Amino acid sequence: MTKIKFCGLRSVSDIEAVNLLRPDFAGFVLAPKFWRCVSRETAKEMKAALSPEIPAVGVFVDNGFDEVAGYLEDGIIDIAQLHGAEDESFIKMLQSCGFKVIKAFKIGSESDAERARLSPADLILLDSGTGTGKLFDWSLIENFGRDFILAGGLTPENAADAVRRCRPYCVDVSSGIETDRNKDKEKMRRFIEAVRSENI
């Protein structure tokens, strides 16, 4: 069964929709240069409101190790998702502290896919770029060889096709469930239904 991650959540109201619709993961952007970024205090409030069965994923882009580890140690997030130039030693240091790590890779060629496949991260995320909202060439990840999260340009309209063609461990969506830069509960519901229709 393909899992679902709603990312770029920004308010307790978003969390209320998550608790109702029950995706498998909830993502908070914690990288300051991105418009979906939330403060530490807001992330803490969102985590407190989030159903305990749904892991919170913190999205970072070249944040310092101590900052990332601090969010994990304080229980504000359960998993770190790294989108910057964090190297294997950064990943392994977090893992040595007992934390789960997702590493994101921009896929534009077969060599990009191979580099992602060899990552020591617990899970890898394959995308067209950080927050671009665009699809990449899915043929590059056919018969990929390990579990992955598929991201980039997913919507309620193409989610079922993505699951059929790519068979990802999880699909990740942010802009595809927004209207005017706000999470749209109807789009969130339709995305869930589209993915789960392929899991029957």
Image (cartoon, rainbow, N blue to C red):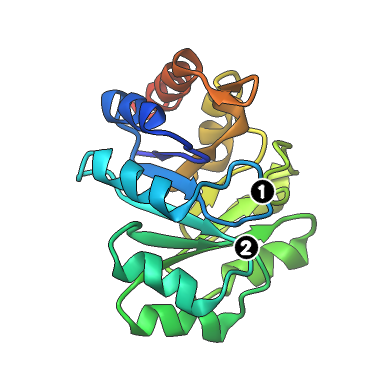
Q: Which residue occupies the foreground of this view, 78 or 161?
A: 78
Residue 131 in picture, x, y percent from top left: 67, 44
Going by the numbered disc 1, the residue's amino acid type is Phe
Q: Is residue 69 above or below residue 92?
A: above
Q: Which element is circle 2 on?
A: loop
| Residue at the spot 51% in from the left edge and 78% down from the top edge | 65
Which residue is at the front of the view, 182 or 53? 182
Query: Residue tagged by mark 1?
Result: 34
Asked whether residue 121 is in view, the answer is no
Q: Residues within 10 Å of mark 1 (few under 14, many from 20)?
A: some
Residue 133 falls in image quadrant: top right
Q: Which callout, 2 or 1, points to the residue nearer the camera?
A: 1
- Please report the residue visible at 68 percent of the width from the left and 62 percent of the height from the top: 113
Q: Quadrant of residue 198?
A: top left
Query: 132 or 49: nearer the eye?
Result: 49
Q: Is residue 51 left or right of residue 16?
A: left
Relative to 140, residue 112 above or below: below
Task: Tell me if label 2 and label 1 are in contact, CB under 8 Å.
Answer: yes
The type of residue carrying mark 2 is Val
**Residue at the spot 79% in from the left edge and 59% down from the top edge:** 109
* Label 1 secondary element: loop
Q: Is residue 59 left or right of residue 113?
A: left
Q: Which mark is residue 61?
A: 2
Location of residue 102 in the rendering, given as x and y in whole percent from the top left corner = 48, 62
Residue 197 percent across, percent down from the top left: 39, 21
